[in-house]
Amino acid sequence: MVRAIEERDRLFEENYGLIGFVVNSKLGYAWKGKTNQANYSYDDIFQMVSIGLMKACEKFNPIEFPDVKFSTYAVQLMVGEWKRYMRDKGTSVNFSRSIKLDHYRIVTMGLENAPY
C-alpha cells in the first residue's frame, strides 16, 4: 500500500517504542551476554530493526487484513529484517546443528587438543 510521506512518518513515530521491544526482548540474544560470538553491536541491531519498522509502515494494508494489528505485522517484519541482515553478513558455510553442538561441548570442556 502506498502511503503519503507524512502518514508513514506519523505511523513510524507512533510505533517507535516497538524498536526497543524487539531489540531487547526478541533479539536480546544477539547482543547480550556471552553468546555474542559475531560481535553485533546494539546500534547495528537498532538500525536494522528501525529499517524493518519503516518497511512495515510502508507496506501495512489494514484493508487487506482487517484482523491483523499493525504491531503484530511490524514486529514480524522487524525480526525478519534482522535475520536477513545476519544471513547476508554471515558466513556462506552452514553447519548442521549437531556439529555446532559438538563444537560448543569441545570448547566449553577445554578439549580442543583431545586425541580423537
Image (tube, rainbow, N blue to C red):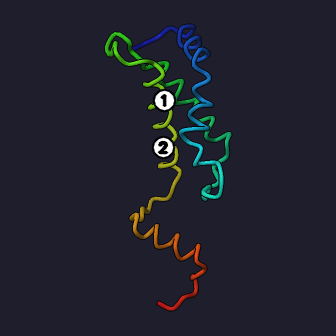
Determine whether, in the image, residue 73 is placed left or right of residue 42: left
Other-residue count near label 1 (Cα within 10 Å), few / some / many at <14 / 14–19 / ≥20: many
Q: Mark 2 or 1, which is nearer the eye?
A: 1
Which quadrant of the view contains residue 9? top right
Locate residue 61, reporting x and y percent. 38, 14
- Seen in the image, is 90 located left or right of residue 60? right
Residue 63 in which image quadrant: top left
Residue at the extreme bottom: 115
What's under tag 2, amino acid-wise?
Lys
Q: Residue at x 48, y 22 (%)?
A: 71
Residue matched to label 2:
83
Q: Residue at x 63, y 49 (%)?
A: 40
Mark identifier at residue 99: none
* Residue depicted at 62% across the width and 35% down the height: 47
* Whether residue 7 is situated above or below residue 37 in the rendered picture: above
Kind of residue sitting beneath label 1: Val
Q: Position of residue 91 (x, y in %)?
A: 49, 59
Which of these two is toward me, 20 or 59? Answer: 20
